[in-house]
Amino acid sequence: MRLETIGDDVYACLQEEPGIGFSNSGLLGAGGGVVIDTFWDLPHTRELLEHYARVLPEPARRVVNTHHNGDHCWGNQLLSGAEIIGHRDCAKRFMDEKPEMMQMIKSADLSGQPALQKFARALAPWDFEGIEPTPPTTLFDDRMSLELDGMTVELIHVGPAHTESDVIVHLPDQRVVFAGDIVFRLCTPVGWIGTFAGWIDALDRILALDPEVVVPGHGPLCGREGPRDMKAYLQHVLEESRHFFERGLSALDAARRIDLGPYEKWHEPERLVFSVERAYREFRGEPADAPIDSAALFRDVGLLQEERWPVRDRV
Ligand SMILES: [Zn+2]
């Protein structure tokens, strides 16, 4: 991971390795410090906090979680005493993902299930021992403002998009947006509860803020091209999925055939399965918060990778 200075008292810590769980975080060094998202496990979050201690010697007084996925908040407990801020639904969903379940998958005997084995192998860099999920307790609905020694910070709820609790962090004076998982940069997005329309609307809202720097939830720093490319990806996959849905193909068969064009170069193209499934749920008129069988989806991701992009060995 690598610390990058983005502006006065504004930093990002980037984990640019491809693969599941490698997310980004931010630090606002004013007003006692605000950490924007922690990492997926305690060892990676400890390293993150060591980077932050180089520029802000005191532990940050606040944490903002952009949404409830573990890869953005399972290190929260290491900022003991900090005020943890998030959307109301972030707190509500916080316990849906379970570290002990991830640890179990890592050590399970999955022989005979090669597609799931790939998923388990992709978890190798992560250690889910000792995580005590620590949810936000300062909650908001639409937006919340912070004033940090003259630095204005706007927390804006833009979900449901990637999840229902998606929040972006906007620094209007610095023209910076921490986008959380509304923006995956040069890697294939995965979505949970939300709709294509909601996600595209969230991207339009980022673009309307006219940022110079966008810190994506995953992948390298970008400018406005980040949200623009994400929007184009979602529109492309939605259109292609509709084409195959109308011809009666299954979601997996659609994912086998969709021509990704320029997006095939993004990391983990096989995660396309998630978006096609989401599109199909929408076409069938299912509610955005209908339960998702994530194990089945990851199995199909593994299958698709074997079939279409067999040289790599990552989820
Ligand atoms: Zn994420």
Image (cartoon, helix red, strand yellow):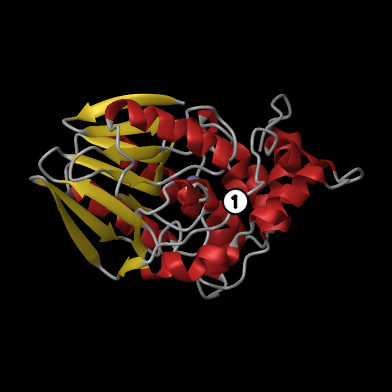
Question: In this picture, is 41 found above or below 313?
Answer: below
Provide residue 172's location: percent of width, then percent of height: 13, 45
**Residue at left offset 31%, top offset 44%:** 60
In the figure, residue 251 lies in which quadrant? bottom right
Give the amino acid type for the residue marked by disc 1 in the picture. Ile
Near-viewer residue (310 or 289): 289
Q: Secondary structure at mark 1?
A: loop
Above or below 119: residue 145: below
Residue 229 in view, yes or no: no
x and y, in percent, of residue 240 in the image: 52, 50
Task: Residue 3: tell me if it is visible.
Answer: yes
Question: Residue 70's spot in the image, x, y percent?
Answer: 54, 52
Q: Residue at x 70, y 55 (%)?
A: 100
Q: Quadrant of residue 305?
A: top right
Q: Which residue has dot 1 on it?
A: 131
Give the residue displayed 42% in from the left and 51% down from the top.
Answer: 80
Q: Is residue 208 left or right of residue 229?
A: left
